[in-house]
Image (cartoon, rainbow, N blue to C red):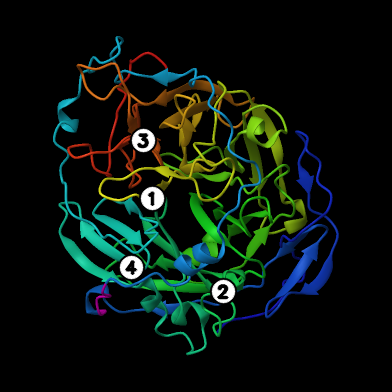
Amino acid sequence: MLSSTTRPIGRTIGRSSVFSYTSGLLSLTGALLITSGNPAFAQVGATYVGPKTTPYQFNGDLRTLPKTPPGSARGEGAEFAKNPGAPVVPPRPAGPPDPLWQKHSPGASPAGLAGVTPTQFTNPSPNFEGQGGVNPPDDNGAVGPNHYIQIVNFTYQVFDKQGNSLAGPTDPKAFWSSAPATDQCRNLDRGDPYVNYDHLADRWVISFFSNENLSDPGNAPGLKVECIAVSKGPNPVTDGWYVYTFLLGFKNDYPKIAVWPDGYYSISQRGYDGTSSLDAVVFDRANMLNGNPAGFQRPASEFPSEHDVIALPSDLTGPPPPVGSPNYYARSYDGSLYSDGSPRIEIFQFHVDWGIPANSTFGLVQNLAPATFRSDICNGSGLNQYCIPQPGTSNKLDALSIWPMGPLQYRNFGSYETLLFTHTVNTDGAGLAGIRWYELRRTPPGSGSWFIQQQGTFAPADSTTSSTTSIHRWTGSIAMDKAGSPHCRPAGHGPVRRNDHAGSPRRGWHCSVRIRPDSLG
């Protein structure tokens, strides 16, 4: 059952009115017991430790669960309807084009000429139909040695590596079938699902959020619960799952979770458009992998000048970082849009100490100056950047250009370490969406300062016979393979032509690849 026991010495992370916007770290000291709703929290200075939650278990075979038919949006759609996202900053006039605008394909130099495409990228295989989800679908997926799991609002589906469906589509709240009838995660999957493959343990992690108050399932402020399921073994279909219902005590919209050796790190936001604050949280990975009671830690007032621009937690791929490495959070931030500095990349560090929570730290450690960029596409700084046209309708799509797009991929190459991510920018200064991408690097791993190894804005010409770009590309995703070559990860949107008409490209996925030793940028 769910436990509300408090650790003798704890720390959770609540709100604080003072935070130093410097390269120093916020140290979490002091102690006070407080309560927030149902759970009890141990406060250490300006931070909290969440109560340990005892997991339930799903011991069945996912193939036996009933399939969930496509349905209408619950909660998510209602929330968007209630929150029109009036911009804090109005749209800006047209300006100069992005200084890194790449009008050619990787490996080519003149505009309109195609680069050399590796044979393995000419015909993607396997190539199979996934789930559609509701509006918004919030689609994402993770791949392991033998399985691929796709998740959308409000179902997951498990495939083998050839694209054959093994289980689902099913609502992940079915994992909580052994929980009490009053359990939030058993009753209500509000959406924003996420799936990770934890390659260090050969396990799977599926998460979504729910409402603290089940009597008001459509009320956005009711969000205060994170539902996390961890597979008991490498086979997500038959090995069973440990499932946790974490009562957070704060609204946790737009959560993103990342794998790190000492925890599952996440970011979430309490509101939009500068109305509230962001929250970095780390969940106790070691205990969750073993099905033990597990808690979480959360620092306070971590993000100055935030305007609800999330910072992504670093998600490990490949060899682990040096022992004791903190998790890195990074975000692109358009200071010109918010009139609080230049466009920049902010890097934070979250060091967790599960044994002595007072030793945990979080803080801004570095600002990097990338080539200038514009985050507003057509609607200033508002949530609803409905700027992307689509064929056959006057309804436009959200560019989601204020936020960085996950994952923030981390790799340790031995002599150096990297962070990669993307965000959507105003490519031509007049509303054409393109993908800005970065490789951040630090040498050697675990010491020194991060620097921008390479960066670019991807918005190539419409064809090999044209120097004109009219195709929008947005919500991109990027990762680097073990050879050091950056690749895109399709995120589910783009490209679509600016002035859409019959015969124009349809909304869909588009991939690009750079092969070493291509030139940087």
**Distance CA(mark 4)–CA(mark 2):** 21 Å
State left or right for residue 479 relative to residue 500: right
Residue found at x 17% / y 37%: 503
Helix, strand or loop under label 4: strand
| Residue under pointer 1 | 199
- Amino acid type, residue under disc 4 in the picture: Thr
- Amino acid type, residue under disc 1 in the picture: His
Q: Nearer the viewer, mark 4 or mark 3?
A: 3
**What percent of the width, then of the height, locates residue 301?**
74, 51
**Of pointers 4 and 1, the one earlier in the residue sequence:** 4
Which secondary structure dominates the residues rendered in magenta?
loop
Helix, strand or loop under label 2: loop
**How dense is the environment of label 4, judged by Cα within 10 Å: few (below 14), some, or many (20 and up)?**
many
Q: Which mark is residue 155?
A: 4
Q: Nearer the viewer, mark 4 or mark 1?
A: 4
Q: Is mark 1 in CB contact (under 8 Å) with mark 2?
A: no
Q: Nearer the viewer, mark 4 or mark 2?
A: 2
Q: Nearer the viewer, mark 1 or mark 2?
A: 2
**Distance CA(mark 4)–CA(mark 1):** 23 Å
**Of pointers 4 and 3, the one earlier in the residue sequence:** 4
Q: Which mark is residue 219?
A: 2
- Amino acid type, residue under disc 3 in the picture: Arg
**Distance CA(mark 3)–CA(mark 1):** 30 Å
Q: Nearer the viewer, mark 3 or mark 1?
A: 3
Q: Which mark is residue 374?
A: none
Where 196 falls versus 497 (above or below)? below
Does residue 67 show up magenta in the picture? Answer: yes
